[in-house]
Image (spheres, rainbow, N blue to C red):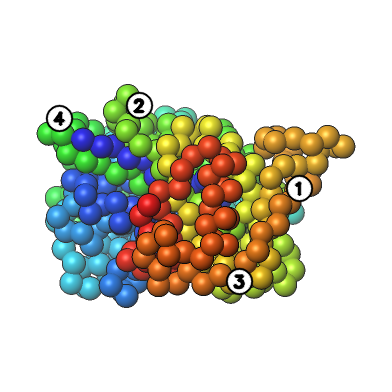
């Protein structure tokens, strides 16, 4: 039995979805553990493109049980739309299971999200406006609604009424109508009817899979530097998308984890606000963006792009206990004639090799590599151009972790397994 966690080592968008889909071939189940529909996972299978937000990335593998775990916050309307769309493309979703302990995104969460961003003015975080943060905040304040509550009107109304006592004060002060508890119940009870056949005790289900010695993949969303504890706070998400968060968000104890695969790109990208020392806000960054098609799956926003930061990756290796790496977009970065990699920072006159809390004050120290390689269409590591191998070997040496998977194109078949 193997239980593999896939975790992003940068600011997300590293290609976790495609790796999940590849590893799911040998798994009984794939579990989405954290985040909500602020995540966007794109996979390309047999030339066909699929964009997921809440559905686990292995959903088109109908033999794989796809589980949305307790750590996810679910917008039922979005999930139902995704289910309907994937069904319309000829795929069953009978392999979808939803934790009854997962929390629900409600209409007022999206209202709060957008209001809070607007009130921050120039200090905005750059959220997706999907209500993720307020949903997690109410989870922690114990006024949230869970999936199981969609089937118990008394509990639903009680929880939403408790939430409304605070939120209606905020809304009134900003000219926003009060929460209509009864109307929300009517809307969400319809969603509940649609989703009922998928709802289960996911923790019990997962434990049975492990008892049968079958393989599980835990699919990460977002990434290390969007983690609310270990990321570039406050420009982070509202959950723990690191490896330990996958344990919490699935109900799997840490001693059952066999592998932690860190996903990165051959460069770095970021969506939204926040520090980004290796960002190339110039022609190089524009070129990387166009070559890598760096536009948000969820928002469509152009991503900020820059050089690979190995100090970030090394710290992610340590924090997550990463046992192997997957590097995507090796084909993309190889198209540049010269490639730079950050191997340290100048920090108030001192050279450091860690990511400090005031990351914005770090000036990157670079090592330069020769590019101009063509990795497209290559299926074996030995066939990669020597310049690409040099680049990959340096990453392995710097991080102390072997590269096990190399992405040389968007399709799942364009993955080299070392």
Mark number displayed over residue 271 = none
In the rendering, at what x and y percent does residue 244 appear? 42, 31
Q: Residues within 10 Å of mark 1 (few under 14, many from 20)?
A: some
Mark number displayed over residue 211 = 4
Q: Residues within 10 Å of mark 2 (few under 14, many from 20)?
A: few
Q: Nearer the viewer, residue 153 or 25?
A: 25
**Counting residues from the N terminus, which is met first, the one under dot 3 or under dot 1?**
1
Residue under label 2: 254
Q: Determine the CA span between mark 2 and mark 4.
A: 15 Å
Query: At x 32% / y 31%, what residue is drawn?
Result: 257
**Counting residues from the N terminus, which is met first, the one under dot 2 or under dot 1?**
2
Q: Secondary structure at mark 1?
A: strand
**Counting residues from the N terminus, which is met first, the one under dot 1 or under dot 4?**
4
Query: At x 31% / y 74%, what residue is drawn?
Result: 48
Mark number displayed over residue 365 = 1
**Counting residues from the N terminus, which is met first, the one under dot 2 or under dot 3?**
2
Q: Nearer the viewer, residue 218 or 74?
A: 218
């Amino acid at each position: 039995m193997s239980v593999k966690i896939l975790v992003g080592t940068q600011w997300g968008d590293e290609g976790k979805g495609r790796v999940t889909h590849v590893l799911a071939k040998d798994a009984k189940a794939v579990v989405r553990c954290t985040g909500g529909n602020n995540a966007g996972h794109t996979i390309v299978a047999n030339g066909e493109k699929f964009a997921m937000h809440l559905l686990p990335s292995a959903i088109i593998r109908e033999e794989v049980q796809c589980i949305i775990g307790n750590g996810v916050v679910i917008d039922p309307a979005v999930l139902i739309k995704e289910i309907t769309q994937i069904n319309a493309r000829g795929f069953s979703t009978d392999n979808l299971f939803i934790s009854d302990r997962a929390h629900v995104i409600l209409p007022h969460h999206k209202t709060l999200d957008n209001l809070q961003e607007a009130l921050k003015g120039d200090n905005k975080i750059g959220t997706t406006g999907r209500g993720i943060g307020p949903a997690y905040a109410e989870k922690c304040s114990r006024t949230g609604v869970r999936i199981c509550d969609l089937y118990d009107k008394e509990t639903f109304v009680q929880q939403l009424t408790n939430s409304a006592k605070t939120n209606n004060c905020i809304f009134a002060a900003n000219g926003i109508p009060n929460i209509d508890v009864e109307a929300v119940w009517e809307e969400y009870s319809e969603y509940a009817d649609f989703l009922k056949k998928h709802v289960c005790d996911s923790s019990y289900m997962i434990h049975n899979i492990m008892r049968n010695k079958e393989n599980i993949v835990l699919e990460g969303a977002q990434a290390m530097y969007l983690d609310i504890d270990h990321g570039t706070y406050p420009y982070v998400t509202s959950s723990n998308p690191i490896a330990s968060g996958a344990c919490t968000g699935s109900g799997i104890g840490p001693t059952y984890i066999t592998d932690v695969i860190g996903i990165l790109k051959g460069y770095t990208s970021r969506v939204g606000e926040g520090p980004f020392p290796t960002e190339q806000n110039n022609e190089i960054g524009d070129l990387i963006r166009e070559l890598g098609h760096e536009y948000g799956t969820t928002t469509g926003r152009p991503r900020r792009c820059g050089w690979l930061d190995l100090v970030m990756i090394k710290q992610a290796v340590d924090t997550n206990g990463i046992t192997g790496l997957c590097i995507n977009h090796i084909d993309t970065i190889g198209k540049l004639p010269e490639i730079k990699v950050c191997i340290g920072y100048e920090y108030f006159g001192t050279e450091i090799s860690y990511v400090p809390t005031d990351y914005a004050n770090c000036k990157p120290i670079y090592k330069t590599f020769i590019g101009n390689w063509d990795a497209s269409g290559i299926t074996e590591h030995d066939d990669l151009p020597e310049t690409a191998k040099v680049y990959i070997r340096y990453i392995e040496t710097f991080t102390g972790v072997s590269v096990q998977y190399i992405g040389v194109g968007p399709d799942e078949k364009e993955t080299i397994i070392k």
